[in-house]
Image (spheres, rainbow, N blue to C red):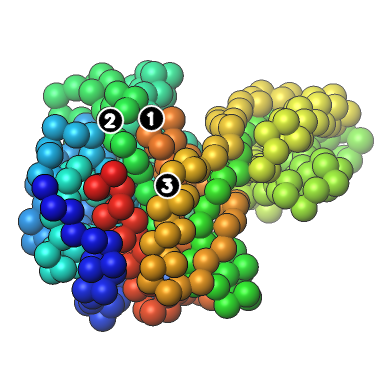
């Protein structure tokens, strides 16, 4: 078979940036909060509408579309040697409360446009190319991040836990999935698991979510590693009582225990001595939540990450010790200290790094090797497939807030690099 030279492809590759920008804008309207913010939570009405929008575009691109039991969506373009393992790309379209319209979305709509551009160029893939829309990359509804990709990677414990997982409104995961049209005839989510080696490569296009590319005026980030994320759930319980009548020496205030722990998180993170160690208390809830009632329960969710797994684990250990000490000192009960996830970092595959770098150079773009401090579905796809990630600049590094922005031109550059990388990986 005659393989078209890559230079032919890179010269004839035309990305329809205007249409792609229009699609990004349209998708952002499927939101539970008003523009410019985006809120799109797993299995809600807006999420289902957004999924329909993506499936329609996959169909228009001539892809064959399949969905699994949790709603990971796959769109496949068959290669001319379809028995070879496929090359996959993709990202997520769920959006945390009051976030922006580019996180994840660029890697899904961008992948569809990459395929469209390759089709227009006359390219025929050898290995099949597959786009994946991952279910619930964000932990918003059920507390666990990258739900879809963890399951694809064969997380048996998660498949089991999801049978009894409920959201903040006490709606079960399975009921929520069913209301969105998934998990219809099964509670055994192991059907979602993919075998190791199901893909010969996985590549994700994403906004950087950091300021480096923009600051340095570089077009393309080539991700060499993804930092190790962890999250922890903590509950304290005390006696509560009347805010006027219970005197200070007689209190055991669960809210103050939470406040102390939040400060301890910051302290332990800073003690690591590395700027790469980060920690955030993004959720802090008090019960009953009345101005004139001493908090009888408090609930925290703690996110901590590092590129160095051991150093991150030391922070987790210290947070645990602090939680115990604070509970003892304040005579409250530490009723829960649960590590929700404690994932190792991963490295990108050398051959994929080389393909991304060569693609960027052939397109006459500037590129830089970098670490991803945010996590991505790629972290879990790396468990079953060689993995790589392409970053594009975003305004001031803003993400997870409405001010998130990436220029049409930068997005188009990312799509071109993705398309050309897929060409190389498909012919490989
Ligand atoms: O939190 C993360 O790193 C990702 O953006 N969900
Ligand atoms: Mn995100
Ligand atoms: Mn993301
Ligand atoms: Mn009263």
Residue 35, above or below 428: below
Is there a contact, CB below 8 Å, between mark 1 and mark 3? no
Report which residue position mark 3 lands on: 352
Q: Whole-percent x and y of residue 414?
A: 39, 67
The residue most toward the front is 2
Residue 231 percent location from the top left of the image: 60, 37
Asked where in the image residue 416 lies, by quadrant, the reply is bottom left
Label 1 or label 3, whichever lies nearer to me, is 3
Residue shown at 11% from the left, 60% from the top: 61
In the image, 155 versus 194, the foreground residue is 194
Q: CA distance from mark 2 to mark 3?
A: 16 Å
Q: Residues within 10 Å of mark 2 (few under 14, many from 20)?
A: some
Along the line of sight, which residue is nearer the eye, 183 or 299? 183
- Of callouts 2 and 1, the N-terminal one: 2
Q: Is residue 137 left or right of residue 395?
A: left
Q: For mark 2, what is the residue?
A: 198
- Describe the element under mark 1 as helix, strand or loop: loop
**Circles 2 and 1 in contact, beta carbons < 8 Å:** yes
Rendering quarter of residue 248: top right
Dot 1, crowdedness within 10 Å: few (<14), some or many (≥20)?
Answer: some
Q: Identify the residue shown where x is 55% and y is 73%.
A: 218
Tags 2 and 3 touching, CB below 8 Å: no
């Amino acid at each position: 078979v005659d393989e078209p030279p890559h230079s032919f492809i890179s010269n004839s590759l035309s990305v329809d940036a205007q249409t792609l920008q229009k699609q990004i804008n349209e998708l952002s309207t499927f939101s539970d909060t008003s523009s410019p913010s985006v809120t799109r939570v797993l299995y809600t009405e807006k999420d289902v509408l957004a999924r329909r929008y993506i499936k329609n575009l996959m169909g228009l691109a001539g892809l064959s579309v399949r969905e699994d039991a949790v709603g990971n969506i796959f769109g496949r373009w068959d290669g001319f040697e379809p028995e070879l393992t496929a090359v996959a790309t993709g990202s997520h379209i769920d959006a945390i409360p009051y976030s922006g319209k580019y996180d994840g979305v660029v890697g899904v709509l961008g992948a569809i446009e990459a395929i469209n551009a390759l089709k227009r160029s006359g390219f025929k893939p050898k290995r099949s190319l597959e786009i994946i829309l991952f279910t619930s990359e964000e932990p918003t509804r059920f507390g666990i991040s990258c739900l879809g990709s963890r399951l694809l990677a064969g997380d048996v414990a998660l498949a089991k836990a999801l049978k009894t997982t409920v959201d903040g409104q006490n709606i079960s995961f399975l009921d929520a999935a069913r209301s969105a049209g998934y998990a219809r005839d099964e509670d055994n989510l192991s059907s979602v698991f993919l075998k190791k080696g199901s893909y010969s490569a996985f590549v994700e296009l994403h906004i950087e979510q950091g300021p480096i590319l923009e600051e340095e005026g570089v077009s393309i980030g080539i991700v060499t590693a993804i930092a190790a994320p962890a999250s922890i759930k903590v509950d304290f319980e005390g006696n509560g009582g009347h805010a006027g009548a219970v005197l200070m020496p007689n209190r055991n205030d669960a809210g103050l225990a939470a406040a102390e722990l939040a400060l301890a998180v910051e302290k332990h993170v800073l003690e690591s001595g590395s700027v790469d160690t980060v920690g955030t208390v993004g959720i802090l809830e008090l019960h009953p939540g009345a101005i004139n009632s001493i908090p009888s329960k408090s609930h925290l969710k703690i996110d901590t990450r590092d590129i160095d797994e051991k150093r991150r684990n030391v922070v987790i250990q210290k947070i645990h010790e602090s939680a115990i000490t604070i509970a003892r000192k304040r005579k409250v009960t530490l009723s829960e200290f649960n590590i929700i996830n404690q994932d190792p970092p991963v490295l990108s595959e050398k051959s994929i790094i080389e393909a991304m770098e060569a693609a960027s150079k052939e397109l006459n773009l500037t590129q830089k090797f970098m670490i991803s401090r945010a996590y991505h579905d790629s972290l879990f796809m790396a468990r079953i497939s060689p993995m790589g990630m392409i970053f594009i600049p975003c305004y001031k590094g803003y993400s997870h807030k409405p001010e998130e922005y990436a220029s049409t031109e930068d997005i188009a550059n990312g799509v071109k690099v993705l398309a050309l990388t897929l060409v190389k990986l498909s012919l490989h």
